[in-house]
Image (spheres, rainbow, N blue to C red):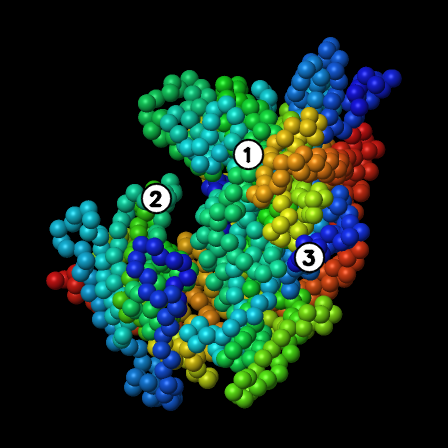
Amino acid sequence: MSTNAIDRRRINGPQRSVEPVYLKTETSVSADSRQDGRTRTNVRPIFMRTGPLSPQATSAASPSGSAYYEQGKIRISCAIYGPRQGRKSNPRMGIFDCDFKYAPFSCSWKRSHLKSSDEKEIGLMLEQAISPAIRLDAYPKASIDAFVTVIESDGKAATISAAINCISAALVDAGIEIYDSVAACSVALMGSEFYYDCTQEEEDSAQCTLLMACMPNANEITYLLQQGKTLPEQTEKAVQTCSDLCTQIYAVICRYLQTSVEQ
Amino acid sequence: MQIDDIPSSTARDLASRIVTPGTAITSDPAYMRGHGTFGENDTIYSSVAGAVERINKLVSVRPLKQRYSGEIGDIVVGRITEVGSKRWRVDVNSRQDGVLLLSSINLPGGIQRRKLESDELQMRTFFAEGDLVFAEVQSFFADGGLSLHTRSIQYGKLRNGQLVTVFPQLVPRSRSHFHTLPCGVDIVVGVNGYIWVSKHVPAAKVEANSELIYSDRNEHISDSERETIARIANCIHLLNRLYVKITDTSIIFAYEASLPHAVKDLLTKEVATDLAHTVKARLLQQS
Amino acid sequence: MSRQELLSPEGLRVDGRRANELRRISCRASVLSSADGSAYYEQGNTKVLVAVYGPREPRAKAQFNHDEAIVNVEFNVAPFSTSERRKRSKGDKRLLEISSFVKQTFEGAIQRSVYPRSQIDIYIHLLQHDGGTLETCINAATLALVDAGVAMADYVCACTAGSIDDTPVLDLNGVEESSIETPDLTVAILPRTGNIALLQMESKLHTSKLEDVMDLAVEGCKHIHKKLDDAVLNAANDLASKLGR
Amino acid sequence: MASLILSPAEQDYIIRGVESGFRADGRSSLDRREVTLRTGMISQANGSARCRIGNLGVGTDVLVGIKAEVNAWTPGDGVPESSGVLICNVECSPSAAQEFEGRGAEELNVELTQLLDRIFNGPQSGIDFEKLCIIPKQAYWVLHVDALVLDVRGGITDALVWATRAALLSTRLPRVVVESIPDDNGVMQAEFDVVDDPDDLTELDGVENMPIAVTFSRIGRRFVVDASEQEEAVAQARMTVAVSPKMDICAVQKGGVLRGFMPTLFSEVLQTAQTIAREEFSRFEKCYAEAKSQALSQIDEPSTGSTFLVPF
């Protein structure tokens, strides 16, 4: 996509440069054999580390908590600053603020350095997904800021759910009080079956994508987004499958957090 | 068109005239300039659109729609917007926020308790942002701001009900603004257009323990009380939309006229129009 | 559009008006429920909606002064207002210019000393654009301010005028305004005293012709004053009758 | 949406009221306020509508204008080869709330714009975008949906979807004539020109099965529909469900930062959304028919061309 606003602080390349249009390869998506060999209900392998950006010596500049999260080709890094004196403050409870940014090289087309409107909206989504889990009343007048950078992205809904998992891990690393960790996952409807954790090609050819974040122990859906048309029963079934999938991802996150704390 | 040109300009005739900004009212030097007017080489011109009012030698123009401008002794309802050092800023639907000083509120533990140092640190135990306060205008500041006080026992924090906002011009100044309606609902009619409709709490109960005056907890409100409060609130909305004086009598008229209808239909177009006719008829008949 | 077509030999203009004829004006006061004062104003095909709030507590604690009200104007243009859809960003210079013109005009007319330490907000929405933007904004803002009961020394009426083939022409529409040869001048006056609140012209006009173009515009303003006065009286009488005055 | 701060006592009063099924204005949890709809008041736009949700002319107020423009197709635009596109843009005016001045409304504008885009731009909206393509790989129609929010008294998402739906229904596009003309070296090139005739206008296809949105605000342990301003200040979360006339779910979006929805509550929300959507569609038809008749009657009475405040 060409840059819309003229960005004076950087060297702007040619006004309009376009992603090459690849010859369409035959993508056969069937129940058991997907493009990358996964089965329909198979989730891409998850790898995560907490604390890469926040060395033990806590200087004011370093974040109070951070996490690095990989899910298949998706790579996300997140830093948490806070609780600290923020721009806007609420006397009764803290404010969770989230800043989301794709790296210019992270998607198949070059992303602009300036924050686009869909990045702003994703930042808002992450706030709505995570802040129900944080004990905001324990931090009156303070603000907790999360800065999420997507290093590599593969599938929009999958990237957002990975970002949510990454933030909830970083929150634990930052020692911020939360009711329960938030786990997120996404499914896409192709034909009449829901495919778990889809890549960008699968998402483009899907009729509908559904993204859900929930707190499995607290049994509460903290975020839900469906894009595309489905039958009501399909939405109901999708929410059910998503909550089961979230419980599994939640288990992975918790196991990792326990091992990292024991070290 | 000057007043003096009219041969028999009786006071009543003068009063009922609607003027717009820039029209000359009178150039008779005997008259003095009041609100809503300004003088230019000894002619009085009106600066707002409204009805001319003449009180013996004072000519003023009261605009039909204007924000509340305070008078000393007015009973007002306000919402705390900001907690400052030893003071609260209160939104009273006026040109600027009013000020409630820590020294002009009742301290829990009765009148005789002296103001302590710690009170200044725990301002939010008395009033916090968003709280509704029932107060009286005590004085004016140099820049026209209102200084409020809540020193009498009936004043203080408002609970157990909901707020309705109306045009300030519709609330006439009267002796008392705290009424208990026959249908068992308390209303506080603020002269600044904020009206608090709440469950009836016997006055004796409030005086019993003065710790209660700053609590945020509502008492138990039964469904029938809740329905009556909602009915009264909708009636006040209706009166406001009809641009009719809002007094306890007009509210009672509207309440009685609304009884045959369900509460949620009161503000639908059909029900509201025929309610409007009955209420206007009774008001004309009564006045 | 060659100049000749703008003014036909018989003296008729593009939309059939005479040289000294105003476009059809229709306006109503108190059209928005939540604003203190509001007005909807149509002059020809230019339609404007104005909401006035205030005088109220200034939001930004920094900019208020203790002895008089400050006037704050925000002017935004609906993207569907022009024939070719154009979305303007918040910092668009042209919009800021018009809002500063409106602000200067009303800073003189409003009796700001009556409302110390407060702020009067004027929010203008241009719903349809066919020439005479500044003119319609000022007239609509006047109507909304009077509807809000803000103390003003007098109405502020604005009108545009220009000259085509050396004949002074009143109230230019979109086509006449955009053609390069016709100079256009906007004048805003306080009708009672005739004082000029604003005089704005961005094109060349020979000084000899300036006099009669200005007089024509002032004539137009007087006519607009009558229209605004009727609208205010309608709204006021309507409220007064309800109140049983 | 607009940050109205209520006292703890008022919040408690509203929450207890909702949980006992009796709201502050007498409505039960599923009752909606009256809706007034007007169409065709922006003559220069291809379609326009104005929707106010609230009783006695006091409520959330939205004006939507639709301008259709032709755009030349270029490969990298992300626009499919043989279909038109719909671009939404929502602006909250400072007349709705003082904090919307200057850049104050930017975050809300982004959220509402993305929500409208999620509902109306794409196959889920039911609009036949193929018909909006003039010449594949060469030229297509772009529908600019611009919404102006004049007043916010709760239920801003529903008002936006109502107004956009009415505006798209009343949209008329000029007819396009496509013929192929041999260019200088004999290759047949497709050319088009737009017929500028006010009586020869075509409607959009498939607009009758556009969805309608119902927003559920969670208050305490229950939820309410069409929350008022005070109820939205107390609500801890909200869920907007867009339902098509054939009872398909076209979009679901959760909002609100304080709490989430229990799965049981969500399935109840999904069922209620369908029953309410049926009533909303019949109500929409009635309002839209009245709006069209109102538009005809007003042509001879320009001064009330757009009766903003219903005279009472």
Residue identifier under label 3: D41
Label 1 neighbour load within 10 Å: few <14, some 14-19, many 20+: some
Residue identifier under label 2: A87
Going by the picture, which residue comes out furthest to the top? B30
Q: Is residue C157 visible?
A: no
Left or right relative to C74: residue B121: left
Q: What element carries label 3?
A: loop
Report the chain holding disc 3: D
Report the chain holding disc 2: A
Q: Is residue C92 visible?
A: yes
Amino acid type, label 1:
Gln
Q: Position of residue C187 (x, y in %)?
A: 64, 37
- The image's mark for residue C104 is 1
Label 3 neighbour load within 10 Å: few <14, some 14-19, many 20+: many
Going by the picture, which residue comes out furthest to the right? B7
Q: Residue at x 59, y 38 (%)?
A: C200
Q: Position of residue C176 (x, y in %)?
A: 66, 51
Label 2 neighbour load within 10 Å: few <14, some 14-19, many 20+: few
Image quadrant assignment for residue D256: bottom left
Q: Residue at x 52, y 39 (%)?
A: C100
How far apart marks 3 and 2 lie (CA) works out to 42 Å
From the image, state whether disc 1 or disc 2 is nearer to you: 1
Whether tag 1 and tag 2 are in contact, CB under 8 A, the answer is: no
Report the chain holding disc 1: C
- The image's mark for residue A61 is none
Q: Which of C209 and B90 is in front in this view?
A: C209
Q: What element carries label 1?
A: helix
